[in-house]
């Protein structure tokens, strides 16, 4: 796969810096069928071949219950990568949109999806769940917490869930979203567009666009915010001295794609 070396560079650095993998781990990649989770799946499958701490890998998709969803292409990719694939059927969409008729469904939906994913991973004997949150997600989440909750907070690189005795890891926290898009562009992935009626109509999407606008006039803004998160040791992040490479590549990308904007954003 093209650009895999760059993807592995980001993911392995994060895994090493935060001790995300232990010898003998069985890791479930949460595959939503979006670009981020599919990139993570490919990265973890490649890393499995040479990482010094041996680990098993499976993929899990939580089927929200939307009509017409076909995960056959995801199954085919998993077969190609030699990764066992599991689909967890749920009625989350029906509960949220038909029964409860939630006006702001995202929080409850995320909670229910996480619960289904964690339970399935535990039942399948996994020790860890890997999620596809990337560098831009870190910055956006921090800013969302600041703007809408008035607090300094983010998700953590590594989280231990005592209720299910499973560790959550986020190996792509150093990887800018532009690299994810480039990887998917170079290596066509079976990305499935979300049928959720709330998709692209969220506070997160608004924050993404706000940061994009601010970044155009304040080059390196997201890099500085990420740096503040690590230096402030927010929710388990710490300054590991890895940011200069991200900064240099981000600046190179901006120079090569100075007009990239909202119309080019893809999920």
Image: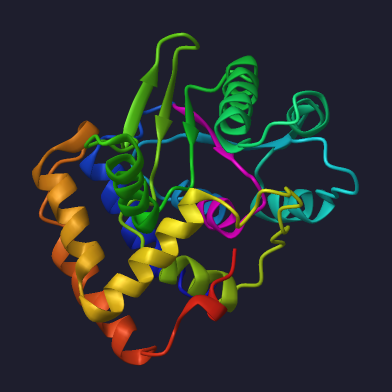
Q: Magenta span covers which residues?
A: 25-40
Q: Report the side of 105 relative to 233 (left or right).
A: right
Task: Choose top left, top right, bottom left or bottom right for residue 145.
Answer: top left
Closest to the observer, 145 or 119 = 145
Q: Position of residue 17 (x, y in %)?
A: 21, 43
Residue most extreme to the front: 103
Residue most extreme to the right: 68
Q: Report the side of 42 relative to 153 (left or right).
A: right
Q: Residue at x 57, y 28 (%)?
A: 114
The quadrant of the rendering that contains the N terminus is: bottom right
Q: Residue at x 58, y 76 (%)?
A: 185
| Tally of numbered discs | 0
Q: Position of residue 35 (x, y in %)?
A: 58, 60
Q: Report the side of 36 relative to 248 (left or right).
A: right
Q: Position of residue 74 (x, y in %)?
A: 74, 52
Q: Residue at x 53, y 58 (%)?
A: 39
Using the rendered image of the protein, determine whether residue 239 is visible from the camera's viewpoint: no
Q: Position of residue 198 (x, y in %)?
A: 66, 48
Q: Report the side of 196 relative to 163 (left or right).
A: right
The quadrant of the rendering that contains the C terminus is: bottom right
- Residue 65 lies in the magenta stretch: no
- Up-down relation of residue 194 to residue 184 (above or below): above
Residue most extreme to the top: 163
Q: Residue at x 50, y 57 (%)?
A: 205
Task: Choose top left, top right, bottom left or bottom right for residue 265.
Answer: bottom right
- Up-down relation of residue 213 to residue 225 (above or below): below
Using the rendered image of the protein, determine whether residue 15 is visible from the camera's viewpoint: yes
Task: Choose top left, top right, bottom left or bottom right for residue 184.
Answer: bottom right
């Amino acid at each position: 796969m093209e650009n895999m070396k760059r993807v592995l560079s980001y993911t392995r650095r994060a895994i090493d810096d935060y001790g995300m993998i232990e010898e003998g781990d069985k890791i479930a990649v949460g595959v939503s069928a979006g670009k981020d989770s599919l990139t993570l799946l490919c990265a973890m499958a490649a890393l499995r071949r040479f990482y010094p701490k041996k680990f098993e890998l499976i993929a899990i998709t939580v089927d929200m219950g939307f009509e017409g969803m076909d995960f056959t292409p995801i199954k085919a990719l998993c077969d190609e990568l030699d990764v066992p694939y599991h689909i967890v059927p749920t009625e989350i969409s029906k509960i949220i949109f038909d029964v409860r008729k939630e006006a702001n469904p995202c929080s409850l939906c995320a909670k229910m999806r996480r619960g289904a994913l964690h339970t399935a991973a535990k039942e399948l004997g996994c020790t860890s769940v890997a999620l596809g949150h990337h560098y831009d997600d870190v910055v956006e989440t921090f800013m969302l917490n600041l703007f809408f909750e008035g607090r300094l907070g983010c998700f953590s690189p590594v989280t231990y869930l005592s209720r299910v005795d499973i560790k959550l890891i986020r190996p792509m926290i150093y990887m800018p979203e532009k690299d994810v898009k480039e990887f998917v562009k170079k290596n066509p992935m079976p990305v499935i567009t979300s049928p959720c009626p709330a998709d692209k109509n969220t506070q997160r999407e608004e924050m993404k666009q706000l940061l994009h606008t601010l970044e155009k006039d304040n080059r390196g803004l997201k890099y500085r915010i990420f740096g503040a998160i690590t230096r402030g040791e927010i929710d388990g992040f710490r300054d590991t001295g890895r940011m200069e490479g991200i900064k240099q590549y981000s600046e190179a990308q901006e120079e090569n794609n100075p007009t990239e904007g909202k119309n080019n954003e893809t999920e």
